[in-house]
Image (tube, grey):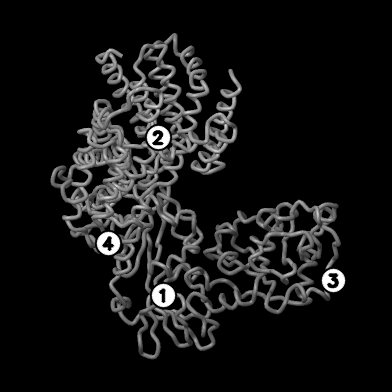
Amino acid sequence: MTGEIAIVLLILIGALVLFVTEKLRMDVVALVVLSVLALSGVTTPEKALGGFSNPAVITVWAMFILSAGLSAAGIADLIGRQILKVSGTSETGLVIVIMLTTGGLSAFMSNIGVAALMLPVVMDIARKTRTSPSRLLMPMAFASLLGGLTTLIGTPPNLVASNTLAEAGHEPFSLFDFAPIGVPALITGTLFMAFVGRRLLPKELPERFREEWEKDGFHYAHAVEEQVLQLHVTGDSPFDGLTLEETRLAQLLGFHVSAIEREGNRITEIVGNTVVRKGDRLMVEGNMENFEAFRKWQAFELASGAEIAGLLALKKLVLISATLAEDSSLDGLTVRETDFRHRFHAHLHSIRDEDGVKRNGIASHRLRAGNRLQIEIQKESLPALREPGDFEDLELIAEESISDIYPDSEALLEMAIPAESYLTGLELRETGLAEDLGLRVLGIARKPESILFPDSEERVLEGDKLLVHGNRRSISLIRGVQSLEIEEAPDSDPLASVTERAHCEVTLSPRNSLAGKTLKQVNFRNRFGLRVESIWREGRSFRSHLRNMTLQFGDALLLSGPVEKIDELAKDPDFLLLTRSDGADGEPAGAGKAILASLIMVAVIASVLVGFLPVAIAAVAGGTLMIVTRCLSIDEAHRAIDWKAVFLIACMIPLGTAMKDTGAATWMASGVAAAAEPLGPWGLLIGLYLLTALATTIIPTAALVVIMTSLGIDASAGFGIEPRWIVIAIAMAASASFTSPISHPSNVLVMGPGGYRFLDFIKVGSLLILVVMVTVIPLIWLFSTLSGG
């Protein structure tokens, strides 16, 4: 082994570790690989950067644009109308037609683009045929992967494999070289899912749908028992003069104010900054049980001055003032990162720095040496705080100085949890006390033993008394809720005159800007004018504390609100509209655009087939025509490109080049060949296929194909197998990402709408992998024998 081989192997091992552990994003890992290759000198700068001008990379991003053009032009509307005509309403027929249609599109479009295009179509078909979406969506997602196996441009791994083959001095693949193997794999996969696989999927409608069908379609109840209430704002209510957002009605009770009756007039344009006045009657939608439980809370006992000192003495707590030392291990960390409560068994009350005293939102505040900290701590934990290192100048705060620590705007209060409170059984982090009201629970008085500084996972029990620190404004909000009076609505449908309302179900689009953010951070209600009723994730429906849930790709959201707001959301690129209760289909694109986009795609394919243009140039020209003819805008084209995939491929291609140039691929291949020698060519072929198929669950497919094809090409030399057949086997195994919802974006996309669990993918996907392998391996061997290599 040479020094260059050792360097390349170390880079390869480091990349695999980073891919598996997910310490960095996959495209960032690829950039690190590229940088280290160039800096180490094992490849030239020109070769290191050559991936960005590689025809395979150019073809990949151009195909994303072509796929988006077809989708934006309204192909889905045409497809949806034809599927039911051909398949009828039988579940078996639906699965077959949906899979073959999806697979056919995926042969020439990006897999995830096809899945996103077909998702609303399949949901609409499920609604019209009264079929559970879970029986149709996973077959559709798998078909988008199987269809990519049939052509060179069907999936990025095929393009990467062809490029590796060409760089090794062999003839690259033509457009349909994969078809003799890929088409039979698509057909057998379709038959398996239609007659076996679908029977292993959930048959019942997901919990979020009530089984209430009306003759015009699906009726949404979503298992949310909503009531319409009229709440009277009394004359002495603390809510008088506050905006709806300031009242926190949505956060505290889950109420949505739909209209306000004021002095004989009805206000229907309700936004967050709408001001509440005494005498108002609020028309709200929400859960009556939550409101009644909230009103059962006993009156809070506010304490101040000497009373606080007494409580502190009773609870065996002391107040300490300390300075953060110069060499403190906490210097530069946020309070959240220090894990202060668990590390010191204490509560950090406030921080004084050059900008003044900070009491609210200190969890994200970054500590600096010299900061003066006010700390509430158990007496028995005090010695640990006094140990040298993190703190200095510790002082015990005298009782007469407590008022300086607890100003009039703050309070220490006792909150009693009565019988049947909706807080009973919730973890502290689920109660919303901290997030919605800014209250910090310092202790829980509970028999037989009280708890000081409880963990956020501690559950609230009936009869508990919570020792809570917060500001008086939060207490005023609670008093405001308690002051509201429930009145009967003036008619049976108090919202009938407000606006036409409906429900809809949406999921996040593949390249959305909302994943990773909470509904609160997105400001969902004000931004989109719709209320999130529930979120369906990994087979569970979440209906409470939604505003603090982080949105994930694959979530299904049930929304309610005005019909015009749903119409606007249907056009938002962050969402895919799945179904809606009013049965409206939105504004379909004209058939002319769909025909034009289809003709452009046909021209791209034809120019490659007759040898008029290389595939990369044809794809770029086709994408440009999509923009010029306004099938989609330039902004939509930019958004359609999966830049993570582009950077991943462009940065990993130089690694494959370095493996070949340094001899690392040959060195590794000799070890593989020696291991496979007792099993012969069949053993090598099956071994590489299985290794690649298993590795797809933890390694990005494009990176995996670069590594495995470089290895397979060199290993094939000792077995008399034409390298192209080994490369085809590896490319197809890499694209068979069926066993996990996270192994391919198409799988993630359908997980929420289909109500699937992780186990559903393992159960069906593992069998499908075997079916595809049993189809692919014999065909490769057959065609290899017939071609003499």
Q: SS for tag 4?
A: loop
Q: Please, what is the three-letter code of the amino acid marked with disc 4? A: Ser
Task: Say whether residue 698 is visible.
Answer: no
Q: Position of residue 457 (x, y in %)?
A: 60, 54
- Asked if the residue under mark 1 is in contact with the one under mark 2, i.e. CB atoms within 8 Å, the reply is no
What's under tag 1, amino acid-wise?
Answer: Val
Are the residues flagged by discs 2 and 4 in contact, CB closer than 8 Å?
no
Q: Nearer the viewer, mark 2 or mark 3?
A: 2
Report x, y in % for residue 1.
Answer: 58, 18
Place residue 678 in its image quadrant: top left
Instruction: Name which residue type carries label 3.
Output: Ala
Check disc 1 and report its element: helix, strand or loop: strand
* Spatial separation of the CA atoms under disc 2 and disc 3: 63 Å
Return the disc, 1 or 3, that comes first in the chain's sequence. 1
Three-letter amino acid code of the residue under disc 2: Thr
Identify the image quadrant of the C terminus.
Answer: top left
Taking the spot 44% from the left edge, 59% from the top edge, the residue there is 543
Residue carrying label 2:
739
According to the picture, the residue beneath numbered tag 1 turns out to be 257
Q: Which mark is residue 581?
A: 4
Q: Callout 3 environment at 10 Å: few (<14), some (14 to 19), or many (20+)?
A: few
Residue at numbered disc 3: 398
Q: Earlier in the sequence, mark 2 or mark 4?
A: 4
- Distance, label 4 to label 1, CA atoms, is 21 Å
> Percent from the top left, x then y, of residue 448?
70, 57
Mark 2 surroundings: few (<14), some (14-19) or many (≥20) residues within 10 A = many
Give the image quarter of residue 24. Answer: top right
